[in-house]
Image (tube, helix red, strand yellow):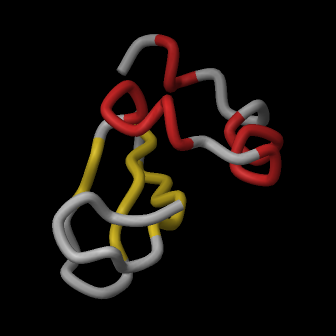
């Protein structure tokens, strides 16, 4: 998955009661719904472990 701003790699960032996708290049954070159309199977499998994203 790539950042929409700089094409850096997006990684899952887990915080207390919330999950975000964060660019490892520019540091921009996205809510899951902002990048849902870009999710790959590996990231989807990782996100399935967290129940808090349905409230985020």
**Outermost residue toward the top?**
55
Q: Quadrant of the C terminus?
A: top left
Give residue 50's quadrant in the image: top right
Residue 6 locus on image (x, y percent): 22, 76
Q: Is residue 40 left or right of residue 52?
A: right
Judging depth in this view, the residue of 11 and 13 nearest the camera is: 11
- The residue at 53%/60% (across/down) is 1
> In the visual, does 32 lie left or right of 6?
right
Instruction: Say above or below: 22 vs 33.
Output: below
Q: Residue 5, located in which quarter of the rendered image?
A: bottom left
Residue displayed at 73% across by 39% down: 44
Q: Is residue 25 above or below residue 51?
A: below
Find residue 45 and report its horizontal and vertical position in percent. Answer: 82, 41
Q: Position of residue 36 (x, y in %)?
A: 48, 30
In this rendering, would 38 be left or right of 7?
right
* Residue at left offset 38%, top offset 25%: 33
How many marks overall? 0
Q: Nearer the viewer, residue 36 or 21?
A: 36
Image coords of residue 19 (percent x, y): 45, 42
**Does residue 36 lie above or below 43 as drawn?**
above
The residue at the point 34 percent across, 71 percent down is 23
Report the front residue among 3 and 51.
3
33 is higher (above) or lower (below) than 10: above
């Amino acid at each position: 998955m790539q950042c929409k701003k700089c094409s850096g790699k997006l990684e899952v960032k887990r915080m207390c009661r919330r999950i975000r996708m964060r660019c490892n290049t520019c540091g921009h954070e996205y809510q899951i719904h902002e990048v849902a159309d870009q999710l790959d199977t590996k990231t989807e499998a990782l996100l399935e472990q967290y129940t808090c994203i349905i409230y985020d």
